[in-house]
Image (cartoon, rainbow, N blue to C red):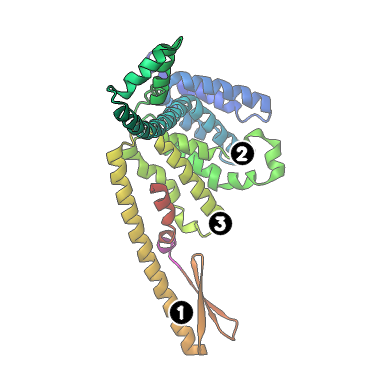
Amino acid sequence: LPSEVERVELPRALGGLCGLLADRQQRVRDDARAVLVSVSKELGPAYMPYVCNVLRATLPDRGFTAHVVGYTLHAVLEAVVGHLVAGRRKARALAAANAQAAAAAAAGGQQGGEDEDLLLAGAGGEGSDDEEDEWRAADTPGGGAAAKAAAGAGKGAAAPAEEPIPEGLLDDALPLALPLIANEIFGEVAEAKEVAQFANNYKEAKKVRGYESYMLLAASVSFGSCMESLLELVRCRLHLASSPSVRNKLSQLLQHAARGVHANPTARAVPLAVWVHGSLGGGLGREEAARERARAAVGGANSDSADKRGGAKVAAIGTVIQATVAGVGKAKRTQLSPEDAAGLHEWLGGGFAL
C-alpha cells in the first residue's frame, strides 16, 4: 500500500486482530494470534512499535487479557527475530566447540610430531610428518581420500555462516515492550499466574513468557545506546531485592539478558569491555557506600540502646537494621533508604556484567 494509506489502514487492521484476542474462547484467541504473528513477521521488526502500541491500547492490563498481552508479545517477538537470534547462538556455540577441538588437536599433533621426529632421527630418514602420512595412506586402497578426510576432521568442521542480524532491530520498540514485560513479571499478572486454579483456565496464564521476551530484546537492540534502558527494568527494583521472590525474578531477568547480549551483534569486544568496566566500578562504589551508611546506622542504634539498657546485640535483616536490646525483648529498627537498599544488591548487576 502507499505509505499514506498504510498509516491509516495498518493500525485499524492490527486493532481488529488484537480485539479478537480479548475473546473468552481459546480457539478464537489462538486463531487471531496466529494471524497477528504472520502479519508481524511479514511486516518485519520495523513495525514492532505499531504492534506494541496496538496491544497496549486494545487489551487492558487487568484480568485474563493481561496474560494474553505478555503471551502474544513473546509470540510476535519470536516470529520476528527469534530465528535470527537462535541461528547466531548456534553458530557461536559451534565455532567455540571447533576452536576447542582445534586446540586439542594441535596439542596432540605437537606431541605426536615430537615423537615422530625422534623416530625419523634414529632411522636417519628425512621428510615431514604430513609426507609420512601421505606415504602410508598411498599404500592402502582409498587411503588418499581417507587421509584427506582425517586431516579435515582434525581441523574441525567449518562453522556455518551466521545469518547477519541487522543492528538495532528493536530499538524503537524497546520503550513500548518493557512495560508489558514488567507488568507480566512484577505486576498483578505475576501474582495471578501463581494461582493454580486461574492458570489452568487460560493457556496464556500457565507460564511467564516475559523472561524470553526480555532475552530477545537484549539480543536485538543496540548495545551502546539501549543497554542502560534495558537494564533499568532491573535497577529500578533493586531496592526490593530483599524479598526472595523479587530477587529471584531479577536474577532470572539478568540471566536471560546475558544470553541475549551473547547473541547481540552490536556487543563487540571494545564497547562490551568499556561497559563492563564502568558497570563494575560504579556498582562496587555504590555498594561500598551503602554498606558504610548501613554500618553507621547500626552503630548509632547500638550506641543508643547501650546507653539506655546497658547492652545490645545487632543483626542486619534484609533492608532493615534491627537492634535487639538484651534482656528486654524490644527492638529498635532503622529502615534503609531505597538508594541504600538498592546499593546493597548491586552484586546482582556485577554478576550480570561478569
Give the mark nearer the N terminus: 1 vs 3: 3
The percent position of residue 52, horizontal first and vertical second, equals 47, 32
Give the mark nearer the N terminus: 3 vs 2: 2
Q: Amino acid at mark 2?
A: Lys
Residue behind mark 1: 301
Residue behind mark 3: 244
Main secondary-structure element of the magenta-colored stretch: helix
C-alpha span from label 1 to label 3: 26 Å
Which stretch appears magenta?
336-341
Q: Amino acid at mark 3?
A: Pro
Residue behind mark 2: 207
Looking at the picture, does residue 336 appear above or below residue 51?
below
Are the residues at dot 3 and dot 2 in contact (C-beta closer than 8 Å)? no
C-alpha span from label 3 to label 2: 20 Å
Are the residues at dot 2 and dot 1 in contact (C-beta closer than 8 Å)? no
Q: Nearer the viewer, residue 292 or 90?
A: 90
Is label 3 in a helix, a strand or a loop?
A: helix
Looking at the picture, does residue 80 appear above or below residue 322?
above
Residue lying at 51% horizontally and 46% vertically, measured from the top left: 252
Q: Nearer the viewer, mark 1 or mark 3?
A: 3
Q: Specify the quadrant of the image occupied by residue 69.
A: top right
Q: Is residue 105 left or right of residue 59?
A: left
Q: Is residue 66 left or right of residue 150?
A: right
